[in-house]
Image (cartoon, grey):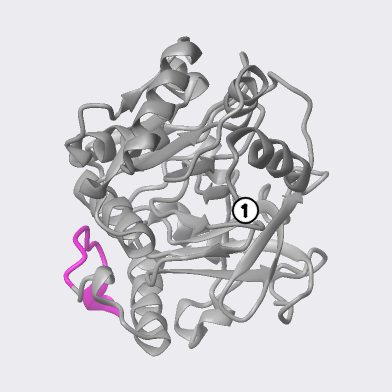
Amino acid sequence: MKSAKHMTQWNKPSIFDIQSPQAFDKIAMEVFRFQAINNPVYHKFIELIGICIDDVKEISAIPFLPIQFFKDYQILIGNDYEGIFKSSGTTGMQRSQHYVKDLKIYRDSFIKGFEHFFGQITDYSILALLPSYVSQGDSSLVYMVQHLIELSQNKYSGFYLNDDEKLAKTLQEIDKTGQKILLIGVSYALLDLAEKYNFRLKNTIVMETGGMKGRRKEMLREELHQILQKSFGVKNIHSEYGMTELLSQSYSKGDGIFLSPPWQKILIRDTEDPFTYLENGKTGGVNVIDLANIYSCSFIATQDLGKKHENTFEILGRFDHSDVRGCNLLVI
């Protein structure tokens, strides 16, 4: 282990070459050791909860860093970074910050992830309705969508802000041509559009990124999707599951059933015991292993509630209480 100390560069196999669960587990364990030794915040957290790095022999024994740490600490290996992504939030709210050492890893992750689930980006017109994210700036979602828009090389692709009439007209005109369209938007903005127009779209994926951002009352996913399905005339509403603290996205093609890319894995922890994992079909806290977080922390205990199935998962809501055990352990 001594030879691994003070490393700031990952020089093992690419996470994007993972082809099997066995390969994932092997690289995940290597990533754990790399981060546990070289990430000072994660190292201190592990130390304070009384875990010896050398005793961690399998994924189920890896300690997951509570996501709130991204609000209070710089979660980073080394001192240099190319960008900082910040979470959305209302005025006065403390925003999470994700220091990204290598933005190319993020670009590789969202490009390869999109193509893994939806095919070539150049097959799509990408219409984005993300007003709250654009206005706040520093959004990882906006960064991703901006790059997807550029890569689509389509003249209609772009951000549509404060002009629902133009968006509706463009959407209907392109859809009639048979061109594939991705309409991606924050939930409240899609609802605003849905209340003004009725569509009958045949070639469009409507994808919500979640959240009312204080603009509307929260509603169940099923209710939201029913309204959007009826207004847009589509069979399914797609969803994107991502967050500032993660550099990979999971996608649902309907019914809130999500799939992760090969370099990401979801575990469901017991809400009373963060070191116990639940069997498939049981509701608990969502832990995410995101190997694209190679230079921050790949093992994140989120505040989301969910359940896992054989190869898929669902997001059911959030914890009523924001404090996850372990959050107050760290004083640096």
Residue 54 pos. (x, y %): 45, 83
Q: Amino acid at mark 1?
A: Thr
Q: Residue at x 50, y 14 (%)?
A: 164
Residues in magenta, as a range: 1-11
Location of the N terminus by quadrant is: bottom left
The residue located at (22%, 58%) in the rendering is 8
| Magenta segment includes 22 | no
Residue 140 visible to the viewer: no
Please indicate, yes or no, whether residue 127 appears anywhere in the rendered image: yes
Query: Is 89 positioned to the left or the right of 133 in the image?
Result: right
Overall secondary structure of the magenta section: loop
Q: Quarter of the image holding residue 167? A: top left
- Name the quadrant containing residue 98: top left
- In this figure, which residue is indicated by the disc labeled 1? 302
For image coordinates 42% across by 19% down, the residue present is: 169
Left/right of residue 220 with respect to residue 209 in the rendered view: right
* Quadrant of residue 277 within the rendered picture: bottom right
Give whichever of 327, 117 is nearer the camera. 117
Q: Nearer the viewer, residue 214 or 29?
A: 214
Q: Is residue 184 above or below residue 56?
A: above
